[in-house]
Image (spheres, grey):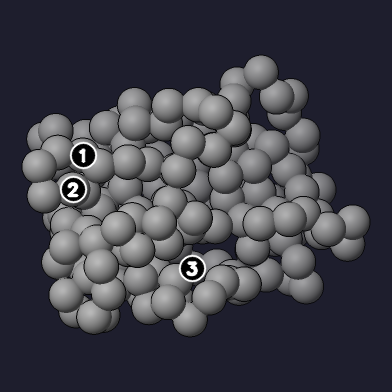
Amino acid sequence: MRIESTDSYAVISSPVGHLGLAERDEHLVLVEFLPKSLPLQLAISPLLQHVARQLEAYFQNPSFTFDLPWALSVSEHQKKVLAEIAAIPVGQLQTYADISKRIHSSPRAVGGACGRNPLPLLIPCHRVVAATGLGGFNAGRHGVDWLPIKRWLLSHEGVEV
């Protein structure tokens, strides 16, 4: 996702590292895992402050339910994938193949859509795994191996990995 000059943006600290947050037209449009080398940037807008508080609540209690206005700017295929992911309860997993069967796609296409998820944590793509292992996570954004975060999130939610 491209950040535009009209967006409000913040970088906050979390138990899994720095998180970038972006708001457009009073809707959350991006949560991204960032390298720790990027500096923190205070959330100035009321919405991003609210997002930061809700993320903190999730990190305190993995069963916390997010209640945020958000908007997706993704393809129709990705909307189908993300809707399936959003329905996965805390502490449960689905495979890329499970989702692909329900939406008549391929596991690889589901993985690609999952890797481009603009709202991880809210749309819990960490709950999607490969048939034989964890699969990927965060599509190698910023050239970083994000699998330790996937492991941490699953452990936080009570899933043994």
In this rendering, would 136 be left or right of 130? right
Residue to which mark 1 is pinned: 134
CA distance for labels 2 and 1: 6 Å
| Residue sitting farthest toward the right | 5
Q: Which mark is residue 130?
A: 2
Q: Which residue is mark 3?
A: 67
Q: Amino acid at mark 2?
A: Ala
Choose top left, top right, bottom left or bottom right for residue 24: bottom right
Residue 156 seen from this side: no
Task: Indicate which disc, 3 or 1, sits on the residue closer to the N terminus.
Answer: 3
The residue drawn where x is 18% and y is 48% is: 130
149 relative position to 98: left or right: right
Q: Is residue 161 above or below residue 10?
A: above
Q: Which mark sits nearer the N-terminus, 2 or 3? A: 3
* Marks 3, 1: nearer the viewer: 1
At a point 43% along the width and 26% down the height, the residue shown is: 145
Question: In the rendered structure, which amino acid carries the disc numbered 3?
Answer: Asp
**SS at mark 3?**
loop
